[in-house]
Image (cartoon, coloured by chain):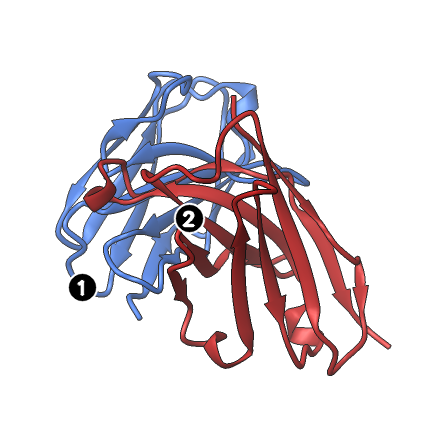
Amino acid sequence: QLQLQESGPGLVKPSETLSLTCSVSDGSISSSYHLWGWIRQPPGKGLAWIGSIYYDGNTHYNPSLKSRLTMSIDTSKNQFSLKLTSVTAADTAVYYCARHGRWDLGTFDAFDIWGQGTVVTVSS
Amino acid sequence: DIQMAQSPSSLSASVGDRVTITCRASQSISQFLNWYQQKPGRAPQLLIYTASSLQGGVPSRFSGSGSGTDYTLTINSLQPEDFATYYCQQSYITPYTFGQGTRLEIK
């Protein structure tokens, strides 16, 4: 069963860049059937989609974060990454990576496999 | 962005009860609607995709229905492990958006 694992600093200073990596195991990130996404959850709040990336590097970003967000993928390492610049306290959250399909790829449009999540706190 | 409104925000029920959670989209999402269960400190788990399809390994007491803008998640014969928070999510168009969640508590 494919597994995802987030990694990165748990504490980031305001105005700096948040960088996270999601490592995929027991499966290939180069699948043509799926995209790889990031979702976050502020403390005590609901879920918010950040963005998704395809194995060829094609990205889809949430417009609310687009100006600060960069996602990348490294198929040789079976990893994908997120960089969020100019962070504030509002970026404090649990960050999840997840796999999802899309109807035009022949898979269903839902986040079917999730990482366990990593807590990121923005504070000086 | 498509807004997703869940109701109720919280719900108290007993083991063995049948419960229904509703999700309404701000525009038609053509059954591109998913349901997730989240327990404290854990990642969400997919229950239902495309409105009514049961994800593999999910008990058959969970079911989903709906079309257009209105969708429901029904849990028959609640079990102790079902007490959690439930989220709907539209995958019709990006940005993908989630409902605010429904917290299901033991009565």
Q: Which mark is residue B27?
A: 1
Can you see residue A43?
Answer: no
Going 65% across and 70% down the picture, which residue do you hit?
A: A91
Task: Note whether A22 is above or below B93 in the view shown.
Answer: above
- For badge 1, the amino acid type reads Gln
Tint applied to chain B in the drawing? blue
Taking the image as shown, residue B29 lies to the left or right of residue A99, namely left
Q: Nearer the viewer, residue B89 or A101?
A: A101
User: In which quadrant of the rendered view does residue A61 lie?
Assistant: bottom left
Going 57% across and 57% down the picture, which residue do you hit?
A: A40
Going 35% across and 19% down the picture, which residue do you hit?
A: B61
On the image, the x and y values in percent for residue A122 come to: 76, 70
* Same-subunit check for callouts 1 and 2: no
Label 1: element kind:
loop
Q: Label 2, on which residue? A: A55
On the image, the x and y values in percent for residue B34 come to: 32, 42
On the image, the x and y values in percent for residue B12 come to: 50, 37
Going 54% across and 36% down the picture, which residue do you hit?
A: B84
- For badge 2, the amino acid type reads Tyr
Q: Nearer the viewer, residue A82 or A112?
A: A82
User: In which quadrant of the rendered view does residue A120 lie?
Assistant: bottom right
Chain label for disc 1: B
State yes or no: discs 1 and 2 in contact (Cβ < 8 Å): no
Taking the image as shown, residue B46 lies to the left or right of residue B24, namely right
Tint applied to chain A in the drawing? red
Quadrant in the picture for the C terminus of chain A: bottom right
Q: Residue furthest front?
A: A76
Label 2: element kind:
loop
